[in-house]
């Protein structure tokens, strides 16, 4: 009798644990929209926003990091550029040149649906990382949106990061210069 009760209790426990486990898996991967300063991106609930003064927004999961930088047209005008006539490719070329000087590994620029991107690599804290940088143009600013992960995970996460990039929406938002 006790053996039978123990078997039933174990079976009930396994069922409950399985249901909780299954619910947690679905909850973790639920889509979640993040918005800051005129940029909206859809990630998953695995991401959390982390403050970092170097970025307009910084979103982190246990596998992927997403950083955004808003660069207002006024900041480009101060440097002698005409941002109203610049394309995302022109912006990407400027950023690629800068990134090559720091990281020596920026790939060629690719374009899709008016969005320019390139891949670069960097090491930090003893680990190698691979990043995809995307350039977007809004009504008052250019946006650099970077997706990164550990280099050894890049192949399996690249499509996921590119999918997140396709969810980016730009509006005017509040003005934050290079922040």
Image (spheres, rainbow, N blue to C red):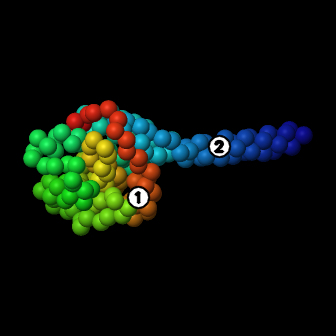
**Secondary-structure class at tag 1:** helix
Using the numbered discs, state the Cα–Cα distance from disc 2 to disc 1 in whole angstroms. 27 Å
Q: Which of 25 and 58 is in front in this view?
A: 58
In this image, 169 relative to 75: left or right? Answer: right
Q: In this view, does 2 lie above or below 115?
A: above
Query: Residue at the right extreme?
Result: 1
- The vertical placement of 49 against 108, above or below, is above
On screen, residue 101 versus residue 138, left or right, reads left
Q: Alpha-carbon neighbours of circle 1 within 10 Å: few (<14), some, or many (≥20)?
A: few
**Screen quadrant of the N terminus:** top right
Q: Mark 2 points at which residue?
A: 23
Is 157 or 97 nearer to us in this picture?
Answer: 97
Q: Earlier in the sequence, mark 2 or mark 1?
A: 2
Q: Where is residue 121 in the image (x, y as percent from the top left)?
A: 25, 58
In screen coordinates, is 62 left or right of 29? left
Which numbered circle lies on residue 172?
A: none
Residue at horizontal 17%, vertical 55%?
94
Q: What residue is shown at x 41% (from left), y 37% (from top)? A: 35
Pinpoint residue 90: horizontal percent, then vertical percent.
20, 58
Q: Which residue is drawn at 9% across and 47% down?
A: 80
Examine the rendering and report whether any part of residue 69 can be seen. Answer: no
Q: Is residue 176 above or below residue 122?
A: above
**What secondary structure is marked by label 2?**
helix
Q: Residues within 10 Å of mark 2 (few under 14, many from 20)?
A: few
- Please provide percent x and percent y for residue 89: 24, 60
Q: Is 54 or 114 nearer to us in this picture?
A: 114
- Image position, residue 66 (x, y; %): 36, 46
Q: Work out whether residue 48 or residue 1 is closer to the camera in this orientation and state it.
A: 48
What residue is pinned by disc 1? Answer: 162
Q: In which quarter of the image is the C terminus?
A: top left
């Amino acid at each position: 009798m006790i053996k039978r009760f123990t078997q039933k209790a174990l079976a009930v426990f396994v069922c409950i644990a399985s249901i909780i486990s299954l619910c947690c898996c679905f909850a973790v991967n639920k889509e979640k929209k993040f918005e800051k300063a005129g940029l909206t991106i859809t990630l998953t609930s695995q991401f959390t926003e982390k403050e970092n003064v170097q970025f307009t927004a910084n979103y982190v999961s246990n596998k992927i990091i997403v950083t955004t930088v808003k660069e207002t047209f006024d900041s480009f005008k101060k440097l002698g550029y005409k941002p109203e006539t610049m394309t995302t490719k022109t912006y990407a070329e400027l950023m690629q040149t800068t990134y090559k000087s720091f990281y020596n590994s920026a790939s060629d620029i690719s374009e899709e649906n008016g969005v320019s991107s390139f891949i670069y690599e960097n090491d930090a804290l003893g680990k190698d990382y691979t990043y995809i940088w995307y350039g977007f143009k809004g009504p008052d600013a250019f946006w650099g949106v970077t997706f990164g992960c550990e280099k050894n995970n890049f192949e399996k996460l690249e499509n996921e990061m590119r999918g997140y990039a396709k969810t980016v929406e730009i509006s005017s938002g509040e003005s934050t210069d290079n922040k």
